[in-house]
Image (tube, rainbow, N blue to C red):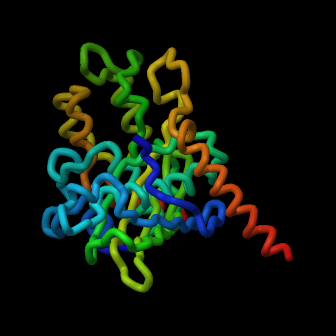
Amino acid sequence: MRWTWIDSFTAFESGRRAVAVKNLSLAEDHFADHFPGFPVMPAPLILEGLAQTGGILVGEANKYEKNVVLAKMSAKFHREAIAGEQLTYTTTILDLNETGARVSGTAYSGADLIAETEIMFAHVTAAHLPAGLPDTKFVFSGELTHLLRMAEATARGESEAEAN
Amino acid sequence: MSYDDILAKVRTTLVDALNVDDNEVTPTARLKGDLNAESIDFLDIVFRLERQFNLKIPREELFPESIFSGDPKFVNDGKVNADGLIELQTRMPYADLSDFRKDPRLDKIEDLFTVDLIVRYLESKVANK
């Protein structure tokens, strides 16, 4: 199963802000059970999408050299999101240093606020890991690579637009 | 800024970071023992204090780890030795070590991290700003 909970980035300002969208398709398996006849996007998957948007923003700030691990999250939900809606996840870096980052995030459907969150990420470096691990970079690899390239392309597009 | 002014700001910070009630954040409250802070909360608290007080809190300054990691120079048989106590006093001049000296077990060291310790640390930082 793939674990990518955003579809694309629509804005990316390095070290500051990232915006991603997630289309809620009725074809997604979880809607069959959550709930039969009333397809509500599970709240943790909205948070996962926000964490991926914010986590890539934090990772990119250090050129993906550091593992970025979700450490703590608080959230407030305002209404359910239903299959067919498009969610816009906006994340902004509040604080960033060598030990980690704090990010605020919102999920909107059109003008409707669906959820707000504040996320703490910790940087996990090779020094924090048990000795002898074959791969000390374990976050920004595998299926996330596609998202990272998309984030970079979005960021590039914006800086080119600014230059023009 | 007076002790009470700093305490009021620290209280707001801890209420937000640890999801505790105002009245739980007393000067003697221990971050782990009383306010249930976990290690990751310390990172969160430092971020929030930096923002709240508009200053930089270098890693290791407020919560130094040299002793807690059990360095044999400072810790023997699970107890902080005389050199360790000097190191603690040097690294954490704002900490009240009087109780800890009576029973300097390493596993009691987390009790040093009280609300009062944070306020006194910030007092020294704000004064030198």
Q: Is residue A28 above or below residue A158?
A: above
At 48% from the left and 58% from the top, the residue drawn is A6
Query: Is A130 drawn above or below residue B29 in the view shown?
Result: above
Q: Residue at x 43, y 30 (%)?
A: B66
Quadrant of the snapshot with the C terminus of chain A: bottom right
A70 on left or right of B10 = right
Answer yes or no: is residue B52 visible: no
Q: Front-most of B15 and B1?
A: B15
Relative horizontal placement of residue A124, taking residue B28 as reference (left or right)? right
From the viewer's perspective, is residue A87 above or below residue A1? below
Query: In this view, which residue lies farthest toward the bottom?
Result: A111
Percent position of residue A131, x then y: 49, 17
Closer-to-camera residue (B4/A60): A60
- Return the x and y of residue B69 as percentages of the image width and height: 37, 26
Residue at x-position 68% and y-position 55%? A152
Check the picture and name the quadrant holding the N terminus of chain A: top left
The residue located at (50%, 19%) in the rendering is: A133
Residue B102 visible, this orientation: yes
- Number of callouts in the render? 0
**Which is more toward the observer, B110 or A116?**
A116
Residue A158: percent from left, percent from top = 73, 69
Quarter of the view holding residue A12: bottom right
Residue A3 image point, x, y percent: 42, 46
